[in-house]
Amino acid sequence: MTKLKVALAGLGSRGKDTYAKCANIFPDRMEIVAIADIDKDKVEEVARLYNVPKDMCFNSAEELISKEKLADVMFITTQDKQHVGHAIPALKKGYHLLLEKPISPNLNECREIVRVAKECNRKVVVCHVLRYTPFFTKIKEIIEKGTIGDIVNVMALENVGYWHQAHSFVRGNWRNSETTSPMILQKCCHDMDMYLWLIGKKCKSVSSFGSTYLFKEECAPEGAAKRCMDGCKAKENCPFDAEKIYINHKKIGVANGYKAWPLDVLTLHPTVESITEAIKTGPYGRCVYHCDNNVVDHQVVNLNMTDGSTIHLTMSGFTATGSRYAKFMGTEGEIIADMSTNIIKVTRFGEDTEEIDVTKIASDFSGHGGGDNRMVSEFLDLIINDKEPTSAITSVEHSVESHYCALAAEKSRVNGGKVVELDTLR
């Protein structure tokens, strides 16, 4: 089997800690030969781990892309607003692309990358990893068999999780839509893509409501300091306190032996000492009520399909844990799906409920419920075997539809819930 040469543009959490590791998981199919990031420490570490020569290490994605073609494919995992600016010149250099979502918060850029990919005859797969999970793959199989008839409506819930909201969307990289993407695009283009794919329908119009309800200065409790470790008098009763999340949390606290995401966002090698220093001096130690965030912390979206069926999606940062829950209601039955337990309950009207435990039919649930590794595997096979993308592959042509829905939802939200017709965006 052919082994693909891979260039990594961006060594953040996704590039360094998810996709780079696939070189060890699929050593017969991919080899990292070039890397780029503005963080020199990350470049040095990835180069050492994957034996990337010094002359193939670059200080930015722009520097990497400026060189003659160095690999067969490029994984682009830079920041949201940089994606298309890196993707288009890479396509023109001849790279096939694995492109981190979202494609872009700019509609014209979404349209442009589809055009350029076709023009250059290159394949672009967008990282909507949930499509590849054993959990949602099984739901797709059940729906396509017609087990519950035609889908009439879907009720879906995206549990962001209170500490994930605070980490990524209040203190972190995706806190402000002026510098990144609206929350409904950045976090929920996954959901838009997945539910459209699962039911196999097209969206006609969208309405949406949502706001930044809690994470703003006027909601700060009495005595709240600008930073968690600056003598904050509200610290004891604050669940968003940085020490509680990053140091003492039972599951992700460094004091309890945890080292991975989100801790490795604060510091390359998490220890109690390095995390403490990061909280004292860096952005992740800021009070959640005194940040420069503007993205919503809750939002509801109604999607009206062209055939009159509907999807309702709720995204909320006010949940104890992060996962997804959905109920699919059809003309002949219903499916209740809880990703937190990997249990799918299928009930045909008038019949007993069938309970499917997905953990008994799959083994890899690492990284987005097993989606990360399966997505990379299918991308590699797509390129190696020069296949045309199927509807199960998140090709850029399929993925832009989720972006139209998400950006329509944001347009509706900022206009008081006004209905937005999708054809005005397409």
Image: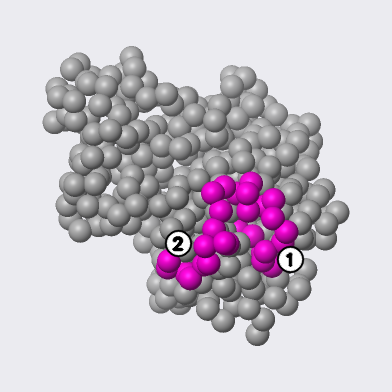
Q: Residues within 10 Å of mark 2 (few under 14, many from 20)?
A: many
Q: Nearer the viewer, residue 196 or 221?
A: 221
- Whole-percent x, y for residue 18 in the image: 46, 61
Give the labeled residue for mark 1. 389
Q: Amino acid at mark 2?
A: Val
| Residue 177 vertical placement versus 364 (above, below) | above
- Which type of secondary structure does the marked residue at label 2 adopt? helix
Question: What range of the chain is rendered magenta?
Answer: 48-76
Q: Is residue 6 left or right of residue 351?
A: right
Question: If the image is split into quadrants, where does the C terminus sit?
Answer: top right
Tell me the distance, in whole angstroms, between the alpha carbons under discs 2 and 1: 30 Å
- Whole-percent x, y for residue 88 in the image: 74, 48
Q: Nearer the viewer, residue 372 or 37?
A: 37
Instruction: Answer with mark 2 or mark 1, whichever residue precedes in sequence.
Output: 2
Which residue corresponds to the image point at 77% horizontal and 68% vertical from the top-left?
388
Q: Amino acid at mark 1?
A: Pro
Q: Nearer the viewer, residue 94 or 318?
A: 94
- Whole-percent x, y for residue 34 in the image: 58, 62
Question: If the image is split into quadrants, where does the N terminus sit?
Answer: bottom right
Q: Nearer the viewer, residue 63 or 382?
A: 63
Give the labeled residue for mark 2. 46
Contact (CB < 8 A) between labels 2 and 1? Answer: no
- The stretch drawn in magenta includes residue 281: no
| Residue 426 vertical placement versus 176 (above, below) | below
Asked if residue 201 shows in the view, the reply is no
Extreme residue toward the right, this view: 119
- Whole-percent x, y for residue 226 in the image: 27, 22
